[in-house]
Amino acid sequence: MPGYLLINKPTGPTSHDIVDRVRRMTGEKRVGHAGTLDPFASGLLIVGVGREATREFARLVGLDKHYIATLHLGATSDTDDRTGQISAGQMANGKWPTWEEIKSVIKTFTGKIQQLPPMYSAKKIHGKKMYELAREGKTFERQPVEIEIYSIAEAKPRREADPQKPEAEASPRQGSMLILDIHCSSGTYIRALARDIGEALSCGAYLEELERTAVGPFTLERAVKADELNKDNWEKYLMPVEQVLNRCQRAAGVLGWKQS
């Protein structure tokens, strides 16, 4: 029975680990996912079961994405996330930006922007993945790509403000977390966005946590937790191929896309 599963991936396993679990429980060899989540990330992973589902992935991969991202301010990472080599950030003039300045900078990242992919990413150069080249210590030139940030805003700021100062004047401390609600186009690297925001703030930043809350019209609230799926119940969570594709088509129309 072909179709799609909306799965809530926990932190820890890779996206391919989830695919392997589904393959074992369904007995179906043709299983894949429509958009990778890094092991440290959690949230919505769309898994296709059966040839009829997996051959239509191109119509799902291009959907817009929603994320809740936690940025660690005041430090950088060679992978742009918490899994890499962490270094202390450099503050301009030895002063932290205020929360008001942070909000102002965040707004500059909306719209169509050029983004340099992370050094440790799966993008290929001359047929080889960049993270493989980086691990081999090889140097190579990355090319920026155009992405679009439809909206970006503070979600749940963890503030450590001076109670004697107005909120707009208060500054965060090193190690403060900035939590953002991000709606973006397919192909956006949220850890690269965290890196660029840190550079714009002159204090450094890397991605501490990431949760994908929606892919196109499909939301995390409708997803089943990965550890709740088993060989006896997976079929009741399976969404028919035609139903999913129809919803993708309507979602693409809302933002004016042309699906391939």
Image: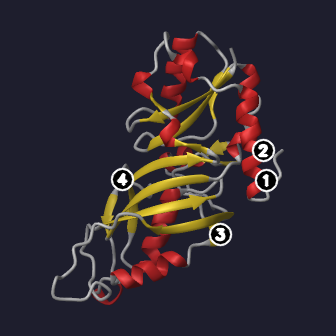
As measured in the structure, the alpha-carbon distance from the residue carrying label 1 to the one carrying label 3 is 24 Å
Q: Amino acid at mark 2?
A: Gln
* Other residues around mark 4 within 10 Å, as few (<14) / some (14–19) / many (≥20): some
User: Which is more N-terminal, label 3 or label 1?
Assistant: 3
As measured in the structure, the alpha-carbon distance from the residue carrying label 2 to the one carrying label 3 is 27 Å
Q: Amino acid at mark 4?
A: Arg
Residue to which mark 1 is pinned: 253
Q: Secondary structure at mark 2?
A: helix
Is residue 58 something one can see in this rendering? no
Question: Residue 80, relative to residue 92: is it above or below?
Answer: above
Question: Residue 202, relative to residue 194: is it above or below?
Answer: below
Residue to which mark 2 is pinned: 249
Q: Secondary structure at mark 3?
A: strand
Q: How many marks?
A: 4
Query: Which residue is more in the foreground, 145 or 256?
Result: 256
Residue to which mark 3 is pinned: 114
As measured in the structure, the alpha-carbon distance from the residue carrying label 3 to the one carrying label 4 is 23 Å
Q: Secondary structure at mark 4?
A: loop
